[in-house]
Image (cartoon, rainbow, N blue to C red):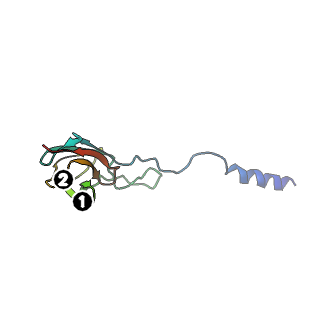
Amino acid sequence: MRAAAWVTVVLLAGCGPGPTSAASCAGPTASVSPRTAAAGDEVRVAGRYFTDGCRDTGQGGRDAAEQDVPVVLEQGGATWRLGSADATPDGFDLRVTVTVPAGVRPGPAHVRVGGARPVRVTLVDR
């Protein structure tokens, strides 16, 4: 009986809360300035945490900065590739200035920067 109780205690010891191996890397984020623009205007796009992965669970190696991160404008069913940017190797940040293309119409649109959440912008006539 004593051996059975010891086995039960040992088995349950591994079931409680404790350290986990879940990744905690921040996903990429993006911003656009200004957020209101017209065709032909230049806007500044910035981003953070653009890495090729998440190596914080003990698998070794270092994260590498993403290269050629696409910057895309979406409005309705139309898509325009505005350019791309390389993240810095020391902070995984990126910055690029792009031009709003001809053919956009006044109203809401989104700028997508790689895998970051889209940034809502407003396009206007000038």
| Residue closer to the observer: 49 or 115 | 115
List x then y, in percent, for residue 10. Answer: 73, 52
Q: Quadrant of the C terminus?
A: top left
| Residue closer to the observer: 74 or 32 | 74
Residue at image location 42% in from the left, 52% down from the top: 55
Residue 104: assigned label: 2
Residue at image location 21% in from the left, 39% down from the top: 34
In the image, farthest residue toward the right: 1
Mark 2 and mark 1 residues within 8 Å of each other at the beta carbon: yes
- Disc 1 crowd rating (10 Å Cα; few below 14, some 14-19, many 20+) is few
| Residue closer to the observer: 69 or 75 | 75
The residue under label 1 is 78
- Disc 2 crowd rating (10 Å Cα; few below 14, some 14-19, many 20+) is many
In space, the residues marked 2 and 1 are separated at their CA atoms by 9 Å
| Residue closer to the observer: 13 or 49 | 49
Q: Does residue 46 sit above or below 75 in this rendering?
A: above
Q: Can residue 94 be spotted in the picture?
A: no
In the image, farthest residue toward the top: 34
Taking the image as shown, residue 41 lies to the left or right of residue 17, namely left
The number of discs equals: 2
- Kind of residue indicated by mark 1: Ala
Taking the image as shown, residue 125 lies to the left or right of residue 30, namely left
Q: Does residue 67 sit above or below 31 in this rendering?
A: below
Residue 43: assigned label: none
- Kind of residue indicated by mark 2: Val
Disc on the earlier residue, 2 or 1: 1
Q: Secondary structure at mark 1?
A: strand
Residue at image location 51% in from the left, 51% down from the top: 22
List x then y, in percent, for residue 96. Answer: 19, 47
